[in-house]
Image (cartoon, rainbow, N blue to C red):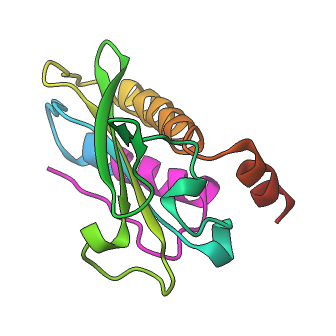
Amino acid sequence: MISYHRLAPYGGWDKFKPELSETIDGLFTKSEGVIVRRLGLRYINAISPEQHGIKSIAQLDLGITIEKEELKSNVNLNFTSEQSNDTDCTVRVATTDFVQGNFPLNTSIIIDVDVTTKKNFKTNNRQQVEQWIEFAHTKEKEQFFRLLTQDTIDALEEK
């Protein structure tokens, strides 16, 4: 098993991807007969009004209703969607009252996007692992940004 973590501050995909590639290269060059049975790429995003312009769950492009009553605070939502034949993505959206850990001051929401291979995944091909990482990164971004309104995305692009 290999686990590679990038803690805050996250320097962006352009810096992180080469680090992952170096780790994958090390795995395949230093180990004989490697069979990869699970891959995962996970981003945990601490959303704040100062950095993202989002004060509450109500400002996401997300609606949660029970008997026509919209839930706008104290929320913990988890869902999984299929991304391909061998990949799923679990998204967790929670207000801070449901989350433990060290998060930046004034964090309003945690958005956790976890892209993983399914149980039947198996490869011994380094290039396939690299391709999956790129695919997973694309899917992670898609799942994250679909939670944001277009106004929020536009404001973030201006920054």
Q: Is 52 positioned to the left or the right of 38 in the image?
A: right
Q: Percent x, y for residue 151?
A: 77, 49
Q: What residue is shown at x 27% (from left), y 78% (from top)?
A: 101
- Residue 93 belongs to magenta span: no
Q: Percent x, y for residue 4?
A: 31, 59
Toward the top, the furthest residue is 85
Whether residue 149 is situated above or below residue 35 in the rendered picture: below
Q: Percent x, y for residue 83?
A: 39, 22
Q: Is 26 positioned to the left or the right of 144 in the image?
A: left
Q: Is 159 positioned to the left or the right of 20 in the image?
A: right
Q: Nearer the viewer, residue 11 or 57?
A: 57
Query: Across the whole image, how many numbered discs are drawn on residues?
Result: 0
The answer to which image quadrant residue 39 occupies is top left
Q: Nearer the viewer, residue 9 or 60?
A: 60
- Residue 5 belongs to magenta span: yes
Whether residue 70 is situated above or below residue 95 in the rendered picture: above
Q: Nearer the viewer, residue 55 or 41?
A: 55
Q: Percent x, y for residue 36?
A: 19, 32
Extent of the magenta region: 1-25
Toward the bottom, the furthest residue is 105
Question: Does residue 20 appear in this view?
Answer: yes
Q: What residue is shown at x 56% (from left), y 35% (from top)?
A: 142
Q: Nearer the viewer, residue 112 or 69?
A: 69
Q: Is 93 positioned to the left or the right of 63 in the image?
A: left
Which corner quadrant holds the C terminus? Answer: bottom right
Question: Does residue 29 appear in this view?
Answer: no
Q: What residue is shown at x 49% (from left), y 58% (from top)?
A: 57
